[in-house]
C-alpha cells in the first residue's frame, strides 16, 4: 500500500509547481550557489558535524560539460580552504563523463583528486546504478595505483556482488562509505527484502572492519545505526564515521555527536537542484514517501525523529 502511495506521489511531481518543489527540497539541498553550500556547511561545523559537498550534476552529453564539473570542484576546494570548512567532496562519475568515455572520466576525476591532494582534502566517489559499478571500482583502483590515498569509494549493501567486491578490493584497504544503495535494482543482482539488505550491510561492515578499512557508516536506519555502533565500539574516534543526508534525522545526528562519534553530513548543492530532486525521487519512490510523511509530520505533529 505504501509503495502504491509513494509511486502516486512521484507521478504527481512534475505537476507540482517549481517553487513548491524548491520549498520541500530546500531541507535536503543547500541551494543553487557555492555560497549557499558554504553557509550550510558552516552551520553544520558549528554543530560539531563534518560535511561532504556534492555539486549536483546531470549525465553530461559533451566532454566540455564534463570538464566544467572539474572547474566547479576547483571552486569548491578554494571555498573550503578560504573559509576553513571541515568538509570533503563527493563526486559522481557520470557527471565527470563516465557515459561518454572511461578515459575522459578517469582524466577528470584524477584532476579533482589531484586538486584535493594539493589542498589536503579528500574525494569520495559516489556509487551510481549498477551499470556503473564495475567501471567505478576500476577507476577507484586505478587512482589508488597511481598513488592517490585521498580517495574513497561507496559500496551498496543492496547489491549481491558487494561482498565479492570487498574481497577484490582488500589489497587496497579501501576507505569505504557503506550504504544500502538508493537505486532499485532487479532481483538477479540485488536483494529485495528489507531485512536482507540490512543483513548484507552488517556482513559487509564486519568484513571491511576486519580488513582494516576506514568505514563511513551511511544510514538513517535506527537498527543499522545500533548494529554499526556495536561493531565500531572498540575503535578510536578517528577510525570510523557515521554519515547522514542533509535534512534527515537531524536530532539523531545531534545525539550521535553528543555521544562523541564523528558524523558527516552529505550536502548537495548546485544549479541543477530541480532536475536532481525529481530524478532522485523517481529513482526510488520510497524517498518521496519519506519526504511526504516528514513534511506532513513537521506540519501536523511529532514525526519520530
Ligand atoms: C551520506 C550518505 C551518502 C549516500 N551515498 C549514496 C551513494 O553514493 N549511492 C547510493 O546508491 N546511495 C547513497 N546513499 C543513499 C542510501 O543508499 C540509502 O538509499 C538511503 O540512505 C536510505 O537508506 P537508509 O539506510 O537510511 O534506510 P531506510 O530504511 O531507507 O531509511 C530509514 C529511515 O530514515 C529516513 N530516511 C531515509 N532516507 C530519507 C530521505 N531521503 N528523506 C527523508 N527521510 C529519509 C526515514 O525515516 C526512514 O524510515 C547515501 C546515503 C547517505 C546517508
Image: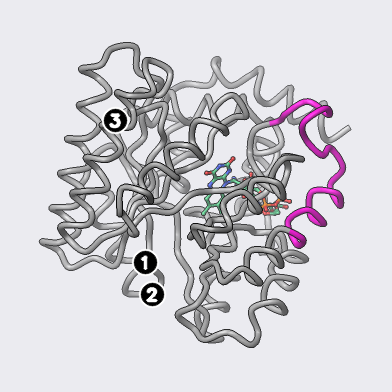
Q: Magenta stretch containing residue 186, yes or no?
A: yes
Q: Which residue was labeled with disc 3?
A: 271
Q: Position of residue 86 (x, y in %)?
A: 29, 67
Q: Which mark is residue 251?
A: none
Contact (CB < 8 A) between labels 1 and 2? yes
Give the structural element (helix, strand or loop) at label 1: helix
Tell me where residue 93 sits by quadrant: top left
Q: How far apart are the two marked residues, 3 and 1, measured between alpha carbons?
A: 21 Å
Give the structural element (helix, strand or loop) at label 3: loop
Earlier residue among tags 2 and 3: 2
Q: Position of residue 1 (x, y in %)?
A: 89, 32
Q: Which residue was labeled with disc 2?
A: 47
Q: How far apart are the two marked residues, 1 and 2, measured between alpha carbons?
A: 5 Å
Q: Which residues are magenta?
A: 184-203
Residue density around tag 2, few if under 14, some if 14–19, many if 20 or more, within 10 Å? few
Residue density around tag 3, few if under 14, some if 14–19, many if 20 or more, within 10 Å? some
- In the image, is residue 35 above or below residue 187? below
| Quadrant that contains the C terminus | bottom right
Amino acid at each position: 500500500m505504501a509503495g502504491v502511495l509513494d509511486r502516486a506521489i512521484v507521478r504527481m511531481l512534475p505537476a507540482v509547481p517549481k517553487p513548491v518543489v524548491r520549498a520541500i527540497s530546500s531541507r535536503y539541498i543547500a541551494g543553487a550557489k557555492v555560497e549557499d553550500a558554504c553557509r550550510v556547511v558552516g552551520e553544520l561545523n558549528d554543530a560539531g558535524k563534518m560535511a561532504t559537498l556534492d555539486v549536483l550534476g546531470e549525465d553530461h552529453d559533451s566532454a566540455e560539460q564534463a570538464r566544467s564539473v572539474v572547474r566547479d570542484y576547483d571552486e569548491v576546494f578554494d571555498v573550503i580552504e578560504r573559509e576553513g570548512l571541515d568538509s570533503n567532496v563527493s563526486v559522481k562519475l557520470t557527471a565527470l563523463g563516465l557515459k561518454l568515455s572511461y578515459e575522459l572520466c578517469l582524466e577528470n576525476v584524477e584532476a579533482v583528486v589531484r586538486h584535493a591532494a594539493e589542498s589536503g582534502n579528500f574525494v569520495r566517489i559516489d556509487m551510481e546504478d549498477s551499470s556503473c559499478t564495475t567501471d567505478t571500482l576500476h577507476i577507484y583502483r586505478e587512482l589508488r595505483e597511481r598513488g592517490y590515498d585521498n580517495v574513497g569509494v561507496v559500496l551498496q549493501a543492496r547489491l549481491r556482488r558487494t561482498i565479492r567486491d570487498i574481497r577484490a578490493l582488500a589489497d587496497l584497504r579501501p576507505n569505504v562509505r557503506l550504504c544500502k544503495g538508493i537505486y532499485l535494482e532487479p532481483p538477479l543482482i540485488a536483494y529485495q527484502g528489507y531485512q536482507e539488505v540490512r543483513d548484507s550491510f552488517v556482513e559487509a561492515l564486519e568484513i571491511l572492519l576486519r580488513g582494516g578499512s576506514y568505514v563511513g557508516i551511511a544510514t538513517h536506519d535506527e537498527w543499522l545505526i545500533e548494529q554499526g555502533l556495536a561493531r565500531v565500539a572498540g575503535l578510536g574516534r578517528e577510525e570510523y564515521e557515521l554519515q547522514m543526508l542533509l535534512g534527515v534525522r537531524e536530532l539523531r545526528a545531534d545525539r550521535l555527536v553528543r555521544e562523541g562519534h564523528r558524523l558527516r553530513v552529505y550536502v548537495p548543492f548546485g544549479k541543477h537542484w530541480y532536475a536532481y530532486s525529481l530524478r532522485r525521487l523517481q529513482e526510488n519512490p520510497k524517498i518521496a514517501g519519506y519526504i511526504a510523511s516528514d513534511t506532513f509530520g513537521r506540519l501536523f505533529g511529532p514525526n519520530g525523529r
